Amino acid sequence: MSDYIATLVAAPGTKAMDEALAARAASALPSGQIKRWLDPGRAIDIAFEDGVFADRHGLWTAMRTHADKLREVLAGERIDVFVQPSANRRKKLFLADMDSTMIGQECIDELAAFVGKKAHVAEITERAMRGEIAFEPALRERVALLKGLQETVVSKVIAERITLTPGGTALVKTMRANDAYTALVSGGFTLFTNRIAEMIGFQENRANRLIIENGCFAGAVVEPILGREAKLATLVELRSTHNLAQDETMAVGDGANDLAMLDEAGLGVAFHAKPAVAAAAHARVDHGDLTALLFAQGFERAEFVET
């Protein structure tokens, strides 16, 4: 038998959990016992035991099964569930998607609004993020529609249309304060990631580069496109650079182009994600903000770094 942890995290602004509900959740797990409150009324760790699994596929299949059972017990409550091995919960490498993950918008959709094509571009974006169409040709198609748009519009989009996802800054700052390396890895554009990474506090960012001619978008992107495989490769590269084990890493994203990165991470989290992504990821956040990823690592609320 091995030791595992189930972490229950209620949505911000709620006090959805009490001892009775936590005890009911613990009873649904083998040898489940309440371990500690990470934030009274909001986040709690439950320790339990299970077998030793032959490979990662078996491990995460079992962890998702336990998580699904807990969601049944908690049905109707706005509570997210993380189930994972108790060892190496605090990660040393964190990779995050940007659009609809660390920020609330899709940057390319907001750019398209300035050429009157937001609805059309947003429909393509949605299909690509659901995995219904390939990411790379979909990006080329959308970028072509931006041809002639002035580069200066990016500052206007960031100032007027982009919102940081609640909890993101605390997540990155707290992990950095605990010696983790953080990277923003986006299928979007460096014109956005350079500034948004700095706003949130990431140490590094990688994204696609739009071709600019005479101060305007040329309607093309520098090849090769940073997509699903490049995100995966970045995780593997940074893990090697920092001499880390696989289970010391965490990644978060919402779209199909994040799936390979999420699967390779020690803990891959789908954040308010498309259905196929939520179903495949190790864990998922359906109700909360990005501080849920701190609770998942065993941080108590008093340990959060927010300034």
Image (tube, rainbow, N blue to C red):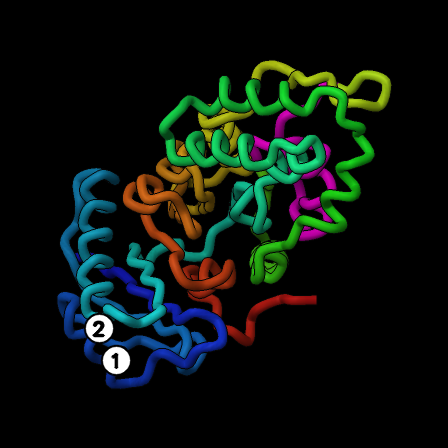
Residue 113 badge: none
Q: Residue at x 21, y 73 (%)?
A: 26
Location of mark 1 (residue): 21
What is the secondary structure assignment of the residue under circle 2?
A: helix
Q: Which residue is mark 2?
A: 25
Q: Nearer the viewer, residue 208 or 121?
A: 121
Q: x and y percent of residue 283 in the render? A: 34, 51
Q: What's drawn in magenta, residue-wise?
A: 186-211
Q: Amino acid at mark 1?
A: Leu
Residue displayed at 57% across by 35% down: 186
- The residue that appears at 80% across and 23% down in the rendered structure is 216
Left or right: 55, with 78 as reference point: left
The quadrant in which the C terminus is found is bottom right
**Secondary element at image label 1:** helix
Cβ–Cβ under 8 Å for marks 2 and 1: yes
Residue 148: quadrant of the picture: top right
